[in-house]
Amino acid sequence: MHTALVIALSLHVLSSVFWAGSSFALARIGGVGGEQLVFPQLGAATIAILTGGYLGHLVHAGSFGTTEQVLAVGAVCALIAAGVQAAIGSPCARGLASWRRQSGGSAFTYRRGSTRGGGPARHRRALHGRSALHLKDA
C-alpha cells in the first residue's frame, strides 16, 4: 500500500505542477504557441484528477471532515478548469493548427527582409495589442 501511495502521490504532484505551470506560462506570454500544449495539458489534467480521486479514496476514505471538504472543493475546481480548458482550448487549438497549415508555416514567424518591416517587435504588438507597445526590442 505504501508503494501505491508514493506512486499515486508522485504522479498527482508532477501532473498538477505541469498543468498549472504551463497554464500560467501560457497566460504570461499571451497564449502564443498554446495550440501545442492543449492536449498535453488535458492529459496532465486527467492524470491529476484520477490520481487525486485515488489518493482521496486511499487516504481519506470513511470520513468527510473539514480537510475532506476543502479537498472536495479543490477537486470540483479542477474538474471545472479541465472542462473549460477542453471546451475552449481544444477548438482553439484545432483552429490555430488549421490556420497555420493554410498559411504555410508557423503562425508567428516573420520574414527577414520583408517589405513591410518591423520584425519581431511588430509581431509582438500585433499579438498583444496596445499592452506590448511599452516592450523594448530584445
Image (tube, rainbow, N blue to C red):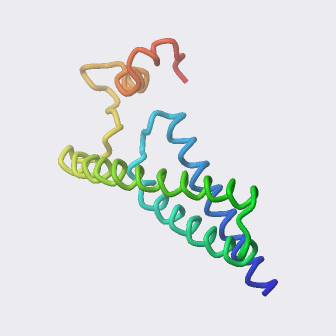
- Quadrant containing the C terminus is top right
Tally the marks.
Answer: 0
Q: 79 or 32, which is in the foreground? A: 79
Q: Is residue 107 left or right of residue 32?
A: left
- The residue that appears at 57% across and 41% down in the rendered structure is 24
Residue 52 x %, y %: 63, 68
Q: Quadrant of the N terminus?
A: bottom right
Vertical placement of residue 129 versus 47, above or below: above
Q: Residue at x 61, y 53 (%)?
A: 73
Judge by depth and name the residue closer to the eye, 19 or 99.
Answer: 19
Please tell me whether residue 28 is drawn above or below residue 19 in the rendered image. above
The image quarter containing residue 76 is: bottom right
Residue drawn at (36%, 19%) of the image: 118
- Please state if 119 lies on the left or on the right of 18 as rendered: left
Residue sticking out furthest to the bottom: 1
Asked if 24 appears above or below 2 in the picture, the reply is above
Which x, y percent locates residue 26?
50, 41
Residue at horizontal 37%, vertical 26%?
123
Task: Tell me residue 107's x, y (percent).
Answer: 31, 41
Check the image and name the residue furthest to the top.
134
Q: Does 31 sit left or right of 57 as displayed?
A: left
In this orientation, which residue lies closer to the viewer: 34 or 78?
78
